[in-house]
Image (tube, grey):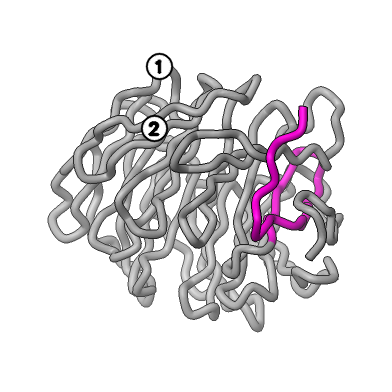
Amino acid sequence: MAACGTLLTAYHGHCERVASVAWSPDGTRIVSGSWDKTVHLWDASTGKHILTYRGHSDRVNSVAWSPDGTCIASGSRDATVHLWEVASGRTLITYQGHTNRVTTVAWAPDGTCLVSGSWDGTVQLWDAAAGKHIRTYSYHCDAVTSVGWSPDGTRIASGSEDCTVQVWERATGRPIALYSGHDSLVTALAWSPDGTRIATGSRGRTVQLWYAATGQHLSTYHGHEWSVNALSWSPDGQYIASGGDDRIVHIWEAQTGKLIFIYRGHATSLWNFVEAVAWSPNGTRIVSGNEDWTAHVWTAFSNPPHLTP
């Protein structure tokens, strides 16, 4: 296996910032959403373009694959979420429940519904088959920046510019945990694969880890020089990848918070922020999206190296 951080392929199909990336469930393809208003499907091994999904009238902020791999959801600054048929590129549903830009979208693990967050301050749960609104969570007092499902599908977490993370009960909409450890707006979150912990990133340059059930703080990871924009857990739950405005991706040991690798493969001019990070389903690769209009696929590791000064 190639050394950690080895660039395997780069995708150059977008003509604006790559704001979101996601792997297909089988790890063979990647979907990317961009400020160029498009969603692109491409081969994870070769970087070859497969299909472009067009329909949004403004920037695409978030993309997500359905668990069965047949559909893609995309959230946009145009205040809508589109559901696309992967094979044909056809729009299946356009969800219009939000009143301001959609910043984040995530599929339920069972594939029956989606949750979306917006600048309108709400988190909305809706049916994936019909696009019918199910429930609105409205306890945040500012824009919602990130959402995520617990692996068992019973809880939803949402991060906000109000500097908090809320954990909701899917069935009732009841808030069951509040995390308020950040001193700046929350920009990203990710559940651990076992569902016990949530990692969060903020404009305050830190990654924080806490218990999902109680909101109890576990640790804070310091290393980014600017805002943290994206987070992803390794499938085995041992590591966390974080990308930020400092134009690099950090890999942390989740248990100790030790920084064990830094990926510096993106262009290093001042404004080329890393906007998106996703670990491959088999744990061997990471894809990162950047303001330089590219997405990089690079090797993760099976035996973690120590960071060399």
| One can see residue 294 in this view | yes
Q: Position of residue 252 (x, y in %)?
A: 57, 40
Amino acid at circle 2: Ser
Nearer-the-camera pick, 194 or 266:
194
Q: Residue at x 53, y 42 (%)?
A: 253
**Left or right, residue 107 beside residue 39:** left
Give the quadrant of residue 184: top left
Magenta region includes residue 61: no
Q: What number is the disc on residue 183?
A: 1
Q: Residue at x 65, y 60 (%)?
A: 302
Q: Is the residue 140 above or below the residue 15 in the image?
A: above
**Which residue is outermost to the top?**
183
C-alpha separation, residue under disc 2 versus residue under disc 1? 12 Å
Q: Residue at x 65, y 45 (%)?
A: 19
| Comparing labels 2 and 1, the label whose residue is closer to the camera | 1
Amino acid at circle 1: Asp
Comes first in the chain, label 2 or label 1 = 2
Q: Position of residue 135 (x, y in %)?
A: 22, 55
What is the magenta range? Answer: 285-309
Count of residue discs: 2
Q: Position of residue 226 (x, y in %)?
A: 63, 21
Q: Residue at x 86, y 55 (%)?
A: 12
Magenta region includes residue 298: yes
Query: Residue at label 2?
Result: 160
Nearer-the-camera pick, 198 or 110:
198
- Mark 1 burial class by Cα count in 10 Å: few <14, some 14-19, many 20+: few
Mark 2 and 1 residues: CB-CB less than 8 Å, in contact?
no
Q: SS at mark 2?
A: strand
| One can see residue 274 in this view | no
Nearer-the-camera pick, 217 or 56:
217
Quadrant of image for the C terminus:
top right
